[in-house]
């Protein structure tokens, strides 16, 4: 084999760089499809994550404490199955050398239908309603775990260049923002349809079809992306050995820990603050809380949208994606504390809060890009340490973290609402009589809990050590390694 390589004057580095020039960059059309797919998937995910608790308490009329326990347990199951999914994906190689794409083209329709069914009120009560919900949810999550791991894992296979993956991450975050923004329309529509007398049970049928089923069908576009990093399935070893390999990926471990202990951020869905605590009279007309929530969400993120286009430039200025996240978390803490003291009693106060949250959104939106870029770097780092490329287990472990985090949030949400004597069957006026402390607690919960979450996040995150020099060393090593593998394969095939 060595003689054959010598005769062909094969230079692994030169061959690899030439291949990069042809295939290393992601065409804009492909990037657009990938970003649109993430927008669709995030419509579905955010419909479930943001509204399932409210749907259970206010449509199915399950008590908050029970909802918190049920949804928390279901999320623990979600989390536990993700590492299994990751190992299955890492050990599998489909025809044409594909690792992830078969999962992107076959699952969206199934997940979309289950997403729609999850928000249907079948008229059941008590344990029967809980049982039906759990069956649909468990089925949804099993399929979603495969799609989610494959969808995000594709980001690390779409290009061998860290700089190019930063660009991909930037556009994917824009797609995520579009998906989240689309779901935020629910509060506007809810305020409108509530005024027309349309029941929320009927409304959620429409939301489920548009954002649940429709979002997943849009995610089908991810099947048009390409895998540009050569992949060789690792030698077979036990499931536990695959998991133990994660100990070499210190970046991923600290990143996961930072996310888990920041569970205060977003623990209580915003609808519980706006619907019950916020309303203004403008020109003699009452603007309800659901409408205010939509306006707040729209206006407080105006600056954050264009900021996403400059994330890579910002990263270069501040010394890397890790520093971007640290600055963003510190800014979020300071701006939220200031906003808390301003308050929200008048439209003028709310306008000032919106201005502050706009600056926070600039940093927060870039944080999403930085986090995903750092996760891709962790896959390279792990390959450098172990010789194995583990998109499946790495991204499924990230999913495991997110779902475990959601489980904690749901449990905490249930405990807090129960402690505040919240009852979804009561009107605002009735709730004021039953639980006045519910209303005094909502502003600190809404504004300060996310600040506490950011503070907790920084504790393990600052211990991540991955310098520019080390990143360049890893990239150079992997370029040579992949080039050598390609060269060996070409010689064996007689090319």
Image (cartoon, helix red, strand yellow):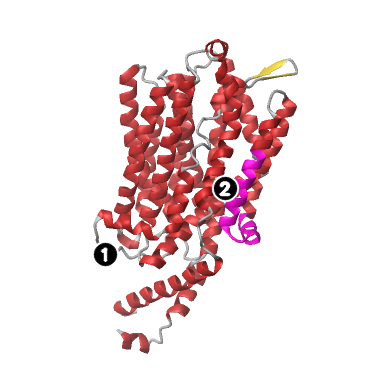
Figure check: 206 above or below 221? above
- Residue position marked by numbered label 1 in the rendering: 235
Figure check: 439 above or below 99? above
Q: Position of residue 252 (x, y in %)?
A: 44, 55
Q: Are marks 2 and 1 in contact (CB under 8 Å)?
A: no
Asked whether 300 or 194 is in front, the reply is 300
- The tally of labels here is 2
Asked whether 338 or 2 is in front, the reply is 338
Residue at 32 percent of width and 25 percent of height? 132
State the mark number for residue 174.
2
Residue at 59 percent of width and 24 percent of height? 274
Which of disc 1 and disc 2 is earlier in sequence? 2
Q: Position of residue 388 (x, y in %)?
A: 35, 64
Q: Which residues are magenta?
A: 311-336
State the mark number for residue 135.
none
Asked whether 44 or 279 is in front, the reply is 279
Q: Dividing the picture into quarters, in which one does residue 451 lie?
A: top right
Magenta stretch containing residue 86, yes or no?
no
Q: Point out the frontmost of discs 2 and 1.
A: 1
Q: Position of residue 292 (x, y in %)?
A: 64, 26
């Amino acid at each position: 084999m060595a003689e054959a390589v010598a005769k062909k004057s094969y230079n692994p580095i030169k061959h690899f760089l030439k291949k990069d020039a042809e295939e290393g960059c992601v065409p804009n059309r492909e990037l657009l499809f990938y970003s649109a797919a993430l927008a669709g998937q995030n419509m579905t995910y955010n419909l479930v994550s943001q509204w399932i608790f409210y749907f259970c308490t206010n449509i199915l009329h399950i008590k908050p404490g029970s909802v918190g326990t049920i949804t928390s347990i279901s999320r623990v199951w979600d989390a536990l199955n993700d590492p299994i999914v990751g190992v299955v994906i890492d050990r599998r190689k489909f025809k044409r050398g594909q690792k992830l794409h078969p999962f992107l083209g076959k699952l969206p329709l199934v997940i979309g239908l289950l997403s729609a069914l999850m928000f249907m009120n079948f008229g059941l009560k008590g344990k029967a309603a809980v049982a039906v919900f759990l069956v649909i949810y468990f089925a949804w999550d099993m399929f979603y775990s495969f799609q989610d791991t494959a969808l995000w894992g594709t980001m690390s296979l779409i290009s061998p260049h860290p700089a190019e993956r930063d660009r991909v991450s930037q556009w994917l975050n824009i797609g995520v923002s579009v998906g989240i923004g689309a779901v935020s329309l629910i509060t506007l529509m809810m305020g409108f349809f509530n005024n027309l007398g349309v029941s929320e049970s009927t409304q959620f049928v429409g939301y489920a079809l548009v954002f649940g089923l429709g979002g997943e069908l849009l995610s089908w576009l991810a099947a048009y992306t390409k895998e540009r990093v050569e992949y060789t399935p690792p030698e077979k070893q036990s499931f536990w050995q695959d998991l133990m390999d994660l100990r070499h990926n210190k970046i991923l471990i600290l990143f996961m820990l930072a996310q888990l202990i920041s569970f205060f951020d977003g623990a209580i869905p915003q609808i519980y603050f706006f619907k019950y605590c916020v309303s203004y009279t403008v020109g003699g007309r009452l603007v309800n809380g659901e409408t205010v929530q939509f306006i707040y969400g729209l206006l407080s993120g105006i600056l954050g949208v264009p900021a996403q286009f400059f994330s890579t430039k910002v990263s270069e200025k501040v010394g890397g994606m890790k520093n971007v996240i640290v600055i963003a978390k510190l800014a979020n803490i300071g701006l939220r504390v200031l906003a808390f003291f301003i308050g929200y009693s008048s439209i003028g106060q709310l306008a000032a809060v919106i201005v502050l949250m706009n600056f926070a959104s600039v940093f927060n939106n870039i944080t999403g890009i930085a986090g995903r870029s750092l996760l891709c770097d962790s896959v390279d780092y792990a390959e450098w340490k172990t010789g194995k490329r583990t998109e499946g287990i790495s991204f499924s472990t990230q999913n495991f973290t997110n779902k475990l985090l959601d489980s904690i949030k749901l449990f905490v949400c249930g405990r807090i609402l129960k402690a505040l004597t919240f009852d979804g069957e009561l009107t605002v006026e009735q709730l004021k009589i039953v639980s006045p402390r519910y209303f005094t607690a909502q502003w600190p919960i809404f504004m300060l809990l996310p600040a506490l979450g950011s503070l907790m996040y920084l504790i393990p995150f600052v211990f991540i050590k991955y310098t520019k020099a080390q990143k360049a060393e890893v990239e150079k090593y992997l370029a040579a390694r992949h080039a050598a593998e390609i060269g060996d394969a070409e010689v064996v095939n007689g090319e």
